[in-house]
Amino acid sequence: MRTIQLFYSPNHTVHNPTYEQYDGNKVPYAESSDRLAVLAAHLRRTGRRLHAPRSYNLDHILQIHTRPYVDYIRTTSRRLAVNETLLPSNFIMDTYTPITQGTYKAACQAVSTALTATDYVLANHSQQAIAYALCRPPGHHAARKHSGGYCYFNNAAIAAQHLAQHGRVAILDIDYHHGNGTQELFYERSDVVYVSIHADPNVQFPYSSGYANEFGGEVGVGYNRNYPLPLHSGDARYMRTLHQAITDITDFNPDFLVISAGFDGHIDDPICQFNLSTQCYEHIGAVISSIGLPIVVVQEGGYNLETLGILAEAFITGLESH
Ligand code: SP5
Ligand code: ZN
């Protein structure tokens, strides 16, 4: 039995866009601050303790993102008024990733939460250590100098980069969407493997990557693996694919595992179209845990406020079962 350490700060609510935009039409912002608030409240109700993150300076962020990009997010956030929202520019690749006054602060705090979880695992470097960063905004669509898909700084990539100073790192991305940012960041590296299971990018965001023939470049050839699945995929297909993904990871023989954990593959997610059951998330957690590696879990998507807490609890129960 493993025991998970949970890290959470309520300050993420300062990142609070009210809308995202499709073909010029504004719709309510799916990545709302209520997501993590209800998730945290649910875990507390079930008796779990959430630890506050430490704060970190910019150095870790600047190993993954360019300084002009980080400066852009900081200075743009700073010049906005409360409740003002700014849509794309050179550094923002879609119309779902607006900046508000609190965006920079919240994005830095999400990174600090991921790094606190990572440092917990490094300090307790038994095969049993598991830490979970309950953070937002999410990160896996954020590339070296681009925001996108509700993501600004790539929390999981920054965690992986930190772990990579201490050993070989595998990133497993179970969010419904392909983590184009994480793939880009490690595409030409052989010290970090990226493996992702996600909805077919022919029909789902981020469209531009996530295809099965993307194996990595340069010295990184063979260290990137994508498993796109059709819309409406269910538990059986998902678990078969997960076992393949786990084989890729164990073949790489990593020292650490980072999980980009999105719960948007659940059947009741309002913006996604997989059919995964609640129980499937417990099975996913159990299979991941059975590898027997130290694990850093980083929160990505999941948009149903009614189910998020239940899904996180199921996933944690699975992770702790080995
Ligand atoms: C971290 C993460 O899960 N990011 C996902 C970003 C996906 N954004 C696209 C969602 C498309 C929702 N479609 C709404 C159509 C309204 N007409
Ligand atoms: Zn997602």
Image (cartoon, helix red, strand yellow):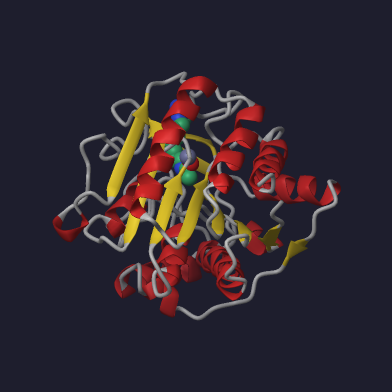
Q: Position of residue 241 (x, y in %)?
A: 42, 30
Quadrant location of residue 96? top left
Nearer the observer, 73 or 251:
251
- Asked if residue 74 shows in the view, the reply is yes
- Seen in the picture, residue 211 relative to 86 is either above or below; the reply is above
Is 107 displayed left or right of 61 in the figure? Answer: right
Q: Residue at x 44, y 71 (%)?
A: 162
Q: Position of residue 243 (x, y in %)?
A: 45, 34
Is 254 displayed left or right of 11 in the figure? Answer: left
Nearer the observer, 70 or 302:
302
Q: Position of residue 129 (x, y in %)?
A: 62, 62
Q: Residue at x 66, y 41 (%)?
A: 318
Quadrant location of residue 125? bottom right
- Seen in the picture, residue 215 relative to 55 is either above or below; the reply is above
Q: How many numbered callouts? A: 0
Q: Residue at x 22, y 42 (%)?
A: 214
- Asked if residue 179 shows in the view, the reply is no
Q: Position of residue 261 (x, y in %)?
A: 53, 46
Is 94 displayed left or right of 110 in the figure? Answer: left
Q: Residue at x 69, y 48 (%)?
A: 320
Nearer the observer, 206 or 194:
194
Is 231 displayed left or right of 220 in the figure? Answer: right
